[in-house]
Amino acid sequence: MRKFNYMLIFLSAVILAACNGGDLYGDSGDDSQMTIVFSHNQPLESPEHAGALKFQEVMEEESEGDIKVEVYPASQLGSLREQVESTQMGEINITLQPSSVVSPFSQGVEVLDLPYLWPTDEQDMYEILDGEIGGEILDTLESARFKGLGYWPGGYKLFTTSDQMINSPEDLDGLTMRVMESQPLIRQYAHWGGNAIPVPYAEVYNALQQGIVDGQENPLQTIYLNNYYEVQDYLIESYHGSMTYIMMSNLEWFESLDEETQQLIRHAEEEGRNEARESLSETEDQYREDLIDSGINYHELTQEEIEVFRDASRDLWEEIYDEDHEREILDRIIEENDELTE
C-alpha cells in the first residue's frame, strides 16, 4: 500500500511538472538545463512560499537560466511525511518541512522541538540557529541521507483550546491536544499532564470542529490561514516552541552537484530564508490583530508564567536529548541562550 501511495504521489508530481513545461527529473526540452524540484506544505500566501519564490528567483537568475526551479507548495507532492520520504528517496530534490516532521527520520533535530529551551526573542533564536550550533544540528541529517541547508521561520507556536484558558502546566491536565507525529511533542504534553494525539495537517480543522481533540499548537499564521479560530475559543500566546522549518535536500543528489552549483544553492537558500523571515515579521502582527478581532479569547503568557513552564520542562530536555553528544549540544544551547538574554 505504501509503494502504491508513493506511486500516486510520483505520478501526480509528473503531471504537475508537465503542466509547468517539464518533468520531475528535469527534462525541460533543453539538455543543458537542470531542473530542481522543491516542495513544501504551506499555502501560496505564506512567508514560506515567499521565501521559496525568492530561492527560485535567485537560482534561475544567477544561473542565467541554466537551472530551473519548480516550486510545489501546499502539499501538492504529498503529505508532510511523504514529502520527506520522497526527498530521502531522491524523487524530490529539495523540501522545506517542520523539524517535527523530520525528527522521526533523524533524532538529532529533536532538540529543535524541546519546549522552552530556545529564546523567546526570534532574533536571538536565529543567532543560535544560524551559528555553529545550528550547523552541527543540520549535520546530523546526513545519517538519514539528507543535506541540511538552513532554518526557515514558521513563528512561535501558540496553544488554542475549545474551552480552557492556559496559564500554567496544570491547566493542561486532562486536555487532549493535536500535535504532529513527533515523540518530543507527544511527550511534552504528557510531561505537563495533558494528552497528545497526532493528527495529519489536512485533518486538523475537522478534528477541532468535531471535538476529537480539545486544542492544538501552531503559529499565528497557521491558525489564521487555516481558520482554526472558527472552531476554538481560546488563543494563548505561549512561546513554548518555534515552528522551525528545515530546508534540506537529498544528500546523494546534492553531493553529485559541482561546487559552483552547491554554492549557488547555499546562497539562494540564505536569500530565501531571509525573505521568509522578513515576510513573517511583516505579517504576524496583522495575523494577531485579526485573530483578536475575530472574538477569540486571547492571552499572552507573562514572563513569570513562561518561567513556570520552563522550570517544569527542564528535566524533559535531558530525557529526550539524552546521548552524550546531544547533552553537549544541549548545554551549549542553554549557555548561549543565557548569554543572549542577560
Image (tube, rainbow, N blue to C red):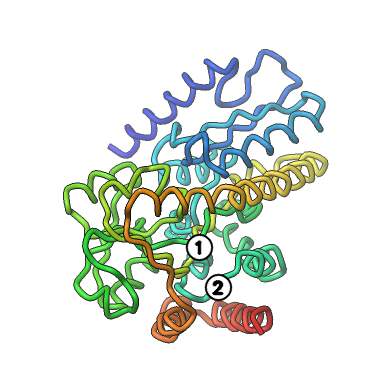
Report which quarter residue 80 is drawn in. top left
Of 287 and 180, nearer the camera is 287
Horizontal arrangement in the rendering, residue 173 relative to residue 59 (left or right)? left
Q: Which residue is mark 2?
A: 118
Q: Nearer the viewer, residue 3 or 295?
A: 295
Residue 98 location in percent, x, y?
49, 53
Residue 170 lies, in percent from the top left, at 27, 80
- Is residue 144 in view from this perspective? no
Q: Report helix, strand or loop for mark 2.
A: loop
> In the figure, 60 relative to 314: above or below?
above
Instruction: Please name the residue shown 44% across and 31% down the image.
Output: 76
Residue occupying the point 27% across, 73% down: 172
How far apart are the alpha carbons under marks 2 and 1? 8 Å
**Number of numbered discs visible in the structure rendering:** 2
Q: Residue at x 27, y 37 (%)?
A: 1
Specify few, some or many for label 2: CA neighbours under 10 Å numbering under 14, 14-19, or 20 or more: many
Does residue 2 appear to the left or right of 305 in the view shown?
Answer: left
- Name the amino acid type tagged 1: Ser
Q: Are marks 2 and 1 in contact (CB under 8 Å)?
A: yes
Identity, as a three-letter code, of the amino acid under mark 2: Trp
Query: Can residue 294 be seen at all in this image of the molecule?
Result: yes
Tell me where residue 72 appears, x and y as whole percent: 52, 32
Kindly identify the residue that appears in the image at 59 percent across and 49 percent down.
247
Q: Give the quarter of the figure containing the C terminus.
A: bottom right
Q: Residues within 10 Å of mark 1 (few under 14, many from 20)?
A: many
Look at the picture and state if 213 lies above or below 44. below
Q: Secondary structure at mark 1?
A: loop
Side (left or right) of 168 relative to 55: left
Of pointers 2 and 1, the one earlier in the residue sequence: 2
Q: Position of residue 33 (x, y in %)?
A: 73, 22
Q: Which residue is mark 1?
A: 242
Q: Nearer the viewer, residue 278 or 303?
A: 303
